[in-house]
Image: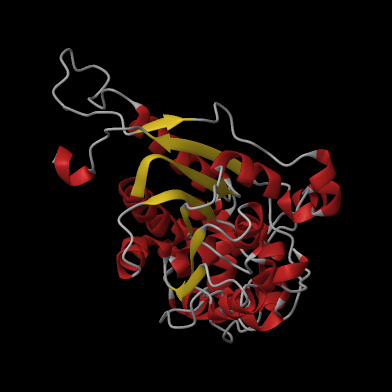
Amino acid sequence: MAPFGETSHIPVLPKEVLHWLAPRPGGRYLDATVGLGGHSAAIVEHTAGQAEVLGLDRDADALAVARQRLHSCSCVHLFQSNFADAARWVQQLGWERVDGILADLGVSSLQLDTAERGFSFLHDGPLDMRMDQRLPETAGKLVNEASYVRLKGIIRDLGEEPLAGRIARVIVDAREKQPISSTLELARLVALAYPPARRYQARNHPATRTFQALRMAVNGELEAVEAFLRVAVDLLAPGGRLVVISFHSLEDRLVKRFFRAEAATCVCPPRQPVCTCGHSPRLRILTRKPITPSDEELASNPRSRSAKLRAAERLPGARGLEEER
């Protein structure tokens, strides 16, 4: 990666991404979550700079790092955007289709390590958590203004936290005395909601799931992934590949179900005796089970431990969504 600038950023599953994406010289590729540019740099290097890459990211700070890293590559086009709007940028470049799409759904190391961004409870900072600073609602606003019912639902549904009710109650009681303004303050409150025995036995910090849930709610992450997946298949050329890396069960389950639906010959309800959907498969699933990091990668990059990669290929002759309606 030396030609693209020095950086401490380690992209997740780099060898596996190149294997399943299979970039080639002359191809066009969408890095839908370019982050700090690690995967895009790998694509450029693998194709000896003979492939074009469209890189998108919601985070202006991350995009600035990627621009610096990839500044010498005229084949890379970078824009600040939610990946759900990918079709807009593909069209702006005058591309009809792309030969491969990569989406790494994880939080970037820059976001986690910058205290001012408020993503991590390991550093004291303001409760922000916005990937795009233009978004109107911060985590602080959500924590201090959302109703008990809404907070409980977010923590339960997006964090898959069994103690969501207790945590939401502790937050609501605490903010009645004074606003909750920092990441460490929120993490301390969440820990207090855990019974002592459960707190000491927990493998991860008690606030892990709550922080995940708030981040996902602030950024509308699941909604964006759903919208992106629908757009991505239409953007793929026949034989083009879609590679998605997820980091927790909700996103991985969403990707798995989408792939299965798009690879199915029928999507009618299971008990319906006769098929009436007229659905044609548009994808061929390439990974029967999710690809996970090797022991070697886990040793060098512990943050990759929960990564799961799934890949699928656009079938030749598959119709687009508009044609099926």
Query: Which residue is at the front of the view, 251 or 28?
Result: 28
Query: Which residue is at the front of the view, 125 or 54?
Result: 54
Q: What is the basis of the colouring in this image?
A: secondary structure
Please report the residue visible at 70 percent of the width from the left and 70 percent of the height from the top.
Answer: 4
**Is residue 121 shown to the viewer in this render?**
no
Task: Point out residue 153 in the picture as x, y percentages from the top left corner.
Answer: 44, 57
Task: Point out residue 179 in the picture as x, y percentages from the top left corner.
Answer: 57, 85
Would residue 31 be found to the left or right of residue 272 on screen? right
Please report the residue visible at 52 percent of the width from the left and 45 percent of the height from the top.
Answer: 243
**Is residue 293 shown to the viewer in this render?**
yes
Query: Which residue is at the front of the view, 42 or 127?
Result: 42
- Tell me if residue 25 comes above or below residue 148 in the rendering: above
Give the residue at the far top of this rendering: 273
Task: Point out residue 183 in the picture as x, y percentages from the top left corner.
Answer: 67, 76
- Tell me if residue 39 comes above or below residue 254 in the rendering: below
Q: Splitting the image into 4 quarters, where does residue 261 fall?
A: top left
Please report the residue visible at 49 percent of the width from the left and 73 percent of the height from the top.
Answer: 78
